[in-house]
Image: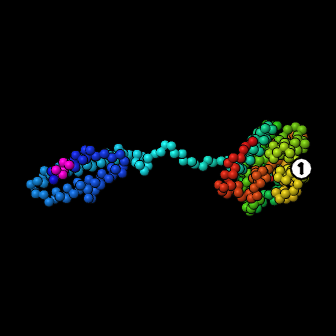
Amino acid sequence: MKEAIEKISQELQQLKATTQKEAEEARIRFLGKKGEITALMEQFRTIAPELKREYGQKLNELKKTAQEKIEALKSAAGETKTEATAQDLTMPGDSFPLGSRHPVSIVRQQIVDIFRKFGYDVAEGPEIEDDYHVFEALNFPPNHPAREMQDTFFVSTGHLNPLLLRTHTSSVQVRTMESQPLPIRVVCPGRVFRNEAISARAHCIFHQVEGLYIDKNVTFADLKQAILLFAREMFGPETEIRMRPSYFPFTEPSAEVDVSCNICHGKGCNICKGTGWLEIMGCGMVDPNVLKASGIDPEVYSGFAFGMGVERIAMLKWQVNDLRHYFENDMRFLSEFATATEV
Ligand code: PHE
C-alpha cells in the first residue's frame, strides 16, 4: 500500500492537462468509481487495524491532493480553450438581418419632402379628436353621413362635442388655422381611422398627407400648379394631371385629381383599368365658412387644400395590388423595400 500511495502521489505531481477533456479523464483515472485512489480506499478496509491510523491519514491526504490538483487543472484549461469550443478568429462573424423602413413610411417621407421643398411646414395633431375639429369647423352639416356610426369610431358619445378617432387629418389644418399666424403653408401627415370592412382596397386604419395654403390672392391656378409639380416629382417628369369636379363640405369648388398612368403612359392597362388615368387625391379652394370658423376673414384671405392616402400613392408607385400587404408585416413583402431610395 505504501508504494502504491507514493507512486500515485508522484504521478499527481507530474499530471498535466491542456483541455477540459484531459482533466476529466484524469479525474476518472484517479477518483472515478473504478479509479486508482478509489481502489486503494477499498483495500484500506481490509488492512490490519494497527496500520489503519497511519494509512488512513495518508490516503485522505492523497485524495485531497488529487481533488485539488484536478480542480486546478480544470480551471486552468478554461471553457474556451477546450478543443470543441476553441475560437477560430478567422471565421466570418454571425450575420443578423438589418431592418429597413416600412414602405408607407418611405412614401410618407417622400411626399412630405416634396412639399418641404415648396416651402411647406409640417404640422401634426392628435389622433383622438373631437367632433368640432374633425367635422363642425370643416362645414359638415349636422346630419352629414360621414358623422354617422358606420364611418366614424366614436370614443365617447352623448354630449355636444363627442370624442372620436379622426377620419382625416384635416383636423390638424383646423388646429393650424386656429393657432398659427398667416400666411399658412403646411402639410399634415398622420394616421386616420374609418369604420370600414377590410379589403384589398380599404382598411380601417390608413395614412394621409393633407395640405393647406392660405394667403392673400391664392387662386385655383396656384392649386393646380402645386399639384402638377408634386405629381411630377412623385411619379416622374412626364406625368400629366387632370381634375374632375367633386364635392367636399370644406372646399368650394372641389376636385378629384388623376395622374396619367405611369405604367402604360396613357395607353390603358389593368392598373388604370384601361382609362390611362389614376386617381390620387381630393382638393379644392377652402370654403369661406371654414375660414370664418377659424377666425380668418374670407374677404381678405383665400386658400387651397388637398388630401391624399399614403397607401394609395405607395400602391401606385410600386404596383402593389392589395392594401392589406402594408399591415400584415410579412417579412417577404417588407424586405422588398429594403433598398428603396428616398427623395
Ligand atoms: N379630407 C379629405 C378626405 O379625407 C381629403 C381632402 C382634403 C379633400 C382637402 C379636399 C381638400 O378624403
Task: Give the image location of residue 69, x and y in percent.
Answer: 28, 46
**Relative to residue 8, is residue 207 drawn left or right?**
right
**Relative to residue 146, is residue 70 drawn left or right?**
left
User: Could you classify mark 1 by the number of other residues whose Cα lies within 10 Å: few (under 14), some (14-19), or many (20 or more)?
Assistant: some
Task: Give the image location of residue 74, x and y in percent.
Answer: 34, 47
State the predominant SS element of the stretch in magenta: helix
Q: Amino acid at mark 1?
A: Arg
Using the image as rendered, state which of residue 36 and residue 322 is in the foreground: 36
* Local secondary structure at mark 1: strand
On whether residue 266 falls in the magenta region, the answer is: no
Using the image as rendered, state which of residue 303 and residue 154 is in the foreground: 303
Task: Give the image location of residue 2, x and y in percent.
Answer: 15, 50
Magenta residues span: 3-7
Say how many tags the image has: 1
Q: Is mark 1 within 8 Å of ligand 1?
A: no
Rendered image quadrant of residue 180: top right
Q: Where is 249 relative to 181, above or below?
A: below
- Dot 1 corresponds to which residue? 242
Locate the C terminus by quadrant.
top right
Residue at the spot x=82%, y=37% of the render? 183
Does residue 288 appear in this view? no
Task: Give the image location of residue 9, x and y in percent.
Answer: 22, 47
Does residue 310 appear in this view? yes
Residue at the spot x=57%, y=48% of the render? 95
**Relative to residue 109, is residue 244 drawn left or right?**
right
Q: Specify the farthest residue to the left.
A: 50
Using the image as rendered, state which of residue 250 and residue 46 is in the foreground: 46
Residue at the spot x=74%, y=47% of the render? 107
